[in-house]
Image (cartoon, coloured by chain):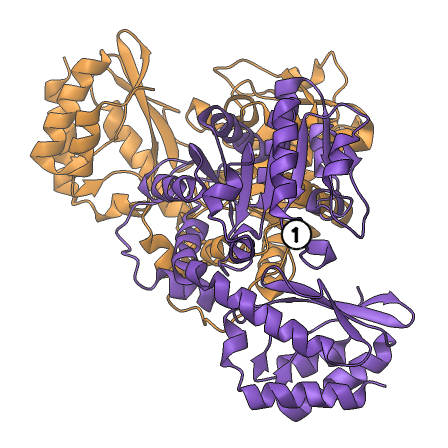
Chain colours: A purple, B orange
Amino acid sequence: MTESISLVEAFKQTKYQIAGNGKRNIQILKEAFEQIDGEQDSDIYGNGKVIEAFQEKMATYLGKESAVFFPSGTMAQQIAVRIWCDEKGVKKVAYHPLSHLEIHEEDGLKELHHIDTLLLGDEAGLIGLEDVLNLDQEIACLLLELPQREIGGQLPDYKTIVEISEYCKANGIRLHLDGARLFEILPYYQKSAAEVCSLFDSVYISFYKGIGGLAGAILAGDKEFTQQSKVWKRRHGGDLISLYPYIISANYYFDKRISKMEQYYENAIELAALFNSCPFIHTKPAVPVSNMFHVHITRPKAQLEAVLEEIYYKTGIGLTSYLKETNKSSASFEVSVGDQYNSIPKDKLQEVFQLLQVKLK
Amino acid sequence: MTESISLVEAFKQTKYQIAGNGKRNIQILKEAFEQIDGEQDSDIYGNGKVIEAFQEKMATYLGKESAVFFPSGTMAQQIAVRIWCDEKGVKKVAYHPLSHLEIHEEDGLKELHHIDTLLLGDEAGLIGLEDVLNLDQEIACLLLELPQREIGGQLPDYKTIVEISEYCKANGIRLHLDGARLFEILPYYQKSAAEVCSLFDSVYISFYKGIGGLAGAILAGDKEFTQQSKVWKRRHGGDLISLYPYIISANYYFDKRISKMEQYYENAIELAALFNSCPFIHTKPAVPVSNMFHVHITRPKAQLEAVLEEIYYKTGIGLTSYLKETNKSSASFEVSVGDQYNSIPKDKLQEVFQLLQVKLK
């Protein structure tokens, strides 16, 4: 992805942005710590009230026996997969071709853990029950990402997950949930986090997607699993003497935003419909199933940049700071709805899409 | 190490403590962020002004071409060793038998990187030039820890380091510095950090020992080395979207305390002399060469606990919160001098050691 400096500049000068919870600035930390008593003790290498209380809170929320706080999801998920591979003595995991582990982690799973991967299903689609039933290699673990981020945040039917879960249980395959955006899909499924997580042996969740915290992750499962994960956390260099900057902010923004996921989801449906009303534009999914979707525009990137910049300066509303060139005549970007969407005056937003309809040709 | 709850309690209630910079509480973060503008941007996955500026500042301070901020030293050092092993195609590192990598990291180097270790020198002493000259196996990297923490923070003559460095250079062995306490030894050697670091191919430093920050580390070396270290940082799950809570606090406390290392060192010499004036007590080293030393007392742990508790309640001064039983008739603890030492009234401190002299029998 090459960034257009003028698009970034135009975006920075907008008053409103359709996506996200606001700027990633240091105020995010300062706000979370404003009401925190400075006399409170730090966590010390995974121990202490601040980390233990949050881990228990998340274990309860996810309906799991135990939970461990990690600095990153990259670390948490590699470790989950490693534990399941060691348990079975089979160094193979199956996941989607566009899994975070496959495309964003510099092959950590292979380079550090020597675990082979089986890419399951088609890049443009979801892993289906058929893909799992037709596995032709022995695997220790199947990793499902819900929603599948790189294809716009798509989701299988809930029934499919249940069937995959049952098949895995019956066939000695551990099922791991990449739940970076788990909170965001609960309104669509109309399930609690614990209900979804009950289908999985291990679960990872993140605190800087919809929740809008600083960083950090939780890995949850049964006690034996999380106990092992703490040993690996130390090996990875993730057992920091103090993780409280992430824990306290995760807790603060969890409490602030967990009840807003329904709103983000409904806003995403509304916003995607506005995009789909424009010529040459379609969203993936057509109707969002979480707070996120991808916008695809069948026009050349350079032409689109000029159109977007003009609209940003004219309306003060920013749609995206980047465009990803999908081919010579098409580009796309990602939208994840958060707090900011509802602060945009509706008439202003209408103006943006009226301009888009006129300018795209 | 089993902790005595009553000793911990007695220690907690003291007004003064001889070691450290104060409690590890959340005020450490709050103080560092008090004057920071909330509008300042976060770092994003290793990029951005806040991380780049600090990395450059540290590279300059250490006299190295380039520096990378890591969440932990455990991560930084495993990665340094891995890079040197890959470079030579020899998966073996030599270090002291009580190296942090050997005893505190759950064998991460072996389990994640499959690197064999050669324990060099005697557990109770330092690695000497002879140990290096007599290496009987091929190694890619030699790791030196200055000062050697687990034996009280001892140091070799500077000449020995120079000779080891020259030998390594001439024999294709990379020399890595575990400089967790590098700042603390500069007053003894009367050298700049850059002078010491010029003897090493790669250097790790920490920000929560003498500097008293939250957590975090810097790994420095030439550009090719640090560039590779960033790839491994991502693989380890250490390339967090935001590391600024550690970076900003590291920078704040570095500026606050870097000029105090001479004071801590002199205070440590004074304090060790007070301990050595008591019967049954000796320090390692006898005369400190940094801000740290170990206190060894040839009396049974339980008897010592009772003596210490009595002194803490009587004087309001805490010497240690724990005792490590070295054998049935002997115990020890570690002292790292920081800001707190100078705030203790001298007559009060005299009283503590007069009591120790009387009570130990």
Which part of the image, by quadrant, shows the N terminus of chain A? Answer: bottom right
Residue A249 located left or right of residue A326: left
Residue B234 located left or right of residue B260: right
The residue located at (80%, 67%) in the rendering is A2
Q: Please provide percent x and percent y for residue B268.
A: 33, 36
Q: Does the image show residue B203?
A: no
Q: Please provide percent x and percent y for residue B260.
A: 39, 50
User: Furthest-front residue in view?
Assistant: A159
Using the image as rendered, state which of residue A301 and residue A235 is in the foreground: A301
Image quadrant in which you'd find residue B345: top left
Using the image as rendered, state which of residue A17 and residue A352 is in the foreground: A352
Q: Does the image show residue B305?
A: yes
Could you say whether the residue bearing mark 1 is in a helix, strand or loop?
Answer: loop
User: Furthest-top residue in view?
Assistant: B328
Q: Please provide percent x and percent y for residue B200.
A: 67, 37
According to the picture, the residue beneath numbered tag 1 turns out to be A155
Using the image as rendered, state which of residue A91 and residue B120 is in the foreground: A91
Using the image as rendered, state which of residue A118 and residue B170 is in the foreground: A118
Question: In the image, is residue B204 above or below residue B60?
Answer: above
Question: In the image, is residue B342 above or below residue B79?
Answer: below
Q: Please provide percent x and percent y for residue B350.
A: 15, 35
The subunit carrying tag 1 is A
The residue located at (45%, 27%) in the rendering is A223
Residue type at mark 1? Leu
Residue B26 located left or right of residue B193: left
Image quadrant in which you'd find residue A97: top right
The residue located at (66%, 37%) in the rendering is A143
Residue B14 located left or right of residue B29: left
Check disc 1: other Cα within 10 Å, few if <14, some if 14-19, many if 20+.
many
Question: In the image, is residue A210 above or below residue A239?
Answer: below
Image quadrant in which you'd find residue A361: bottom right
